[in-house]
Image (cartoon, rainbow, N blue to C red):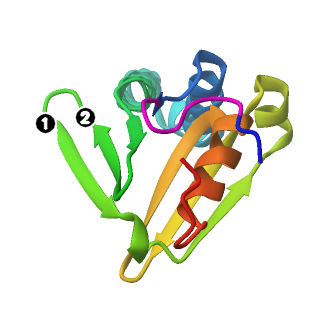
Amino acid sequence: MEQLFDLAGSASTPTPRGRAVLCVWAALPGLIAAPFLFWQGLGWGFGFCALWCGVVFGVWVRSCSLVATLDDCTLTLYMGVAFPVERVIPRNSITSTLIFRTPLLRLAGACVLVIFTPGMWAILPGIPLQEADAIGEALLAGGEDVL
């Protein structure tokens, strides 16, 4: 099977449009809740909006720092800015993957890849569909050498 990019030396990151979709998702609960806080008082409303803008900015920064690399034995996830975290997932422990797309993600040309292992699951949001397909195929190939 022909792959669109080299998995062995590649790193998958969320696209700028994928990050924008994540920020829209993060902003929606605040947009719904803000009128109720403005009803309590102008100070409460502006304070909540400032706090929620900080939350959306945190989601954007976190998604900018997400990098997934795939090698022969492991899938490694790097994330975080102030407190960087590296999570190494052995490829033979991955049981399944799930790719889903919402209408906004379709417009952005991105998807969300969910990776399941016994005891945990990892989410790779906003990555291009071709990369998610190739990563999911490589992770579930089993004993075959897809790289």
Q: How many marks?
A: 2
Numbered mark located on residue 83 in the image:
1
Q: Amino acid at mark 1?
A: Phe
Left-right relation of 138 to 56: right
> Furthest-left residue in view?
83
Q: Amino acid at mark 2?
A: Gly
Left-right relation of 70 to 27: left
Name above or below for residue 80 compared with residue 53: below
Q: Secondary structure at mark 2?
A: loop
Q: Between marks 1 and 2, how big is the CA–CA gap?
A: 6 Å
Identified at 46% across, 22% down, the residue is 42
Numbered mark located on residue 69 in the image:
none
Along the line of sight, the residue nearer the viewer: 136 or 121 = 136
* Residue contact at pointers 1 and 2, CB within 8 angstroms: yes
Q: Which residue is mark 2?
A: 80
Identified at 43% across, 23% down, the residue is 53
Range of magenta residues = 4-10
